[in-house]
Image (cartoon, grey):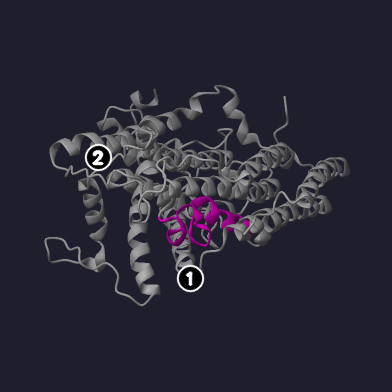
Amino acid sequence: MPTQRPRPWSRPIPPATVIARALHLAPETFWMVVKVLIVLLGPLSLAALLTWVERRGSAMLQDRIGPNRAAILGRWRLLGFPQIVADGLKAFLKEDLVPPHANRVLFWLAPILAFLPAALGFAVIPFGQSFQSGDRTYHMSLLDPGNGMGMLYPMAIGALAVYGVLAAAWGSNNKWSILGGMRASAQMVSYELAMSLAVLAVFLTTGGYDPHEIIESQRGLWNVVPQVVGFLVFFTCMFAETGRLPFDFAEGESEIVAGYLTEFGSMKFALMYLSEYIHIVTASALVATLYFGGWRVPFVADPGPILSVLAFLAKVVFFAWVFVWVRWTLPRFRYDQLMRLGWKVLLPLSLGNFLLQAFLIYRRG
Amino acid sequence: MIQTGTASLEPAMSNPVAPFLPVLILLLAALAMGGFIVWASGWLLPRLLKPRNPQAHKLTPYECGVPLFQQDARRRYNIQFYLVAVLFILFDVEAAFLLPWAVQFKSNLASFGVMLAFVATLLVGYVYVWGKGALEWER
């Protein structure tokens, strides 16, 4: 192991190595543990923040005040920020009811099935520029570049989210739940096509599907400029995939109560609710990676680890805010409009974008 | 061996499982976390401090407040959902076939023509499905 070799004092030992030695770990192992924690807890905390942003943001857009009662020790209200903690605490203390008409196994399993794909989705997305420290290269994504899965991984994991929804719907044995689950699965499946064709166009121009390569290829120009159609299709599909408001037929309050969440309560509900927000964070990260240069900063060739992480975070937060913004701006469509948009508008559009990109590359020679 | 066009894809070939170890750790961590939350909320805390107050009305399926119409909700549903699922399988497999082509694309006529022919067959199926009205949803 290189850690055993005595270092000359003239070369500074990187801080990560110092912590790794203090924990009796190899720096690679230490960095992997750190990344697992970041990838698991980062989107989770962003999602928790997003619930607050959603409530305060919607209040802002609707000229209301929003949650402002929860306060730390009854004194510090912090713009309703403690509401996150209050909500979580309340969810933990509510009665956890498993209805007798439900399928017990599926009812218990559904929140975990919903949470797993949400928690796993972030694994390949680079959240910062790889940096050199000592004689090692540290990559800011859980999986190193060249792992062979690339951007196929978040798409595959994102597609698994439908199982949690279906398990919740079928397990609840409530007509609203089953309607919501059926709608959600058909909707996710329909928009997956347009989404994957839009992403294929990015793979085509990149010549690979590794996220590090995709970001590298956006060195001069972000993908959003040459592929604005692909971006619009992809972003629209993300709204359908995450079940956000122009397309939230899985839980349209005015139609089917709360859809597949109708029978859920307590922390089971909170976990599924949180998973949806994690999906929004992941979707924002995907949009940033595929079309907005990931961690790249405009006019800065190599932003370095700190600036690149901040840039990536800023992009993710911005797109997450767009999700909230759109929700409180647009009304809900009808379900037949959703299906028509997905199959008859977005699918031809993304296929056309794919062919156009292929043709442009062919012409360029 | 296939020319991948991207040199960075090579290391995965030497040991096919090792690069995915972090994902396994992440999966176990997420499983432990989700499992613990559900267990704590549904088993542990109810025995310690959660209220437990089942009533006859609370235990029936939620029905917007009107008397229960039907206990079991698992009935026949619209065939259209099934149709969409079948169509999705067809088109998604075709999209999956396009992936290796997209990554391998060389800008010559043969490469471009092969893809055009493939997309043409896809379009024939798409036009047929559209013409048959399989994409129509009743309002």
The answer to whether residue B107 shows anywhere in this view is no
Which kind of residue does numbered mark 2 sit on?
Ser
Residue that badge 2 annotates: B41
x, y percentage for residue A275? 40, 47
Q: CA distance from mark 2 to mark 1?
A: 35 Å
Residue B4 coordinates in the image, percent (x, y):
70, 34
SS assignment for the magenta stretch, majority: helix
Observer able to see residue A187: yes
Q: Do residues under tags 2 and 1 come within 8 Å of each other at their CB atoms?
A: no
Is residue A235 inside the magenta stretch?
Answer: yes
- Residue placed at 47% from the left, 49% from the top? A282
Among the 4 quarters of the image, the one containing residue A136: top left
Q: Relative to the observer, which residue lies in front, B127 or A314?
A: B127
Residue type at tag 1:
Thr
Rate crowding at label 1 as few (under 14), some (14 to 19) or many (20 or more) other CA atoms within 10 Å. few
Question: Does the magenta run of residues contain A253?
Answer: yes
Range covered by the magenta-colored residues: A233-257
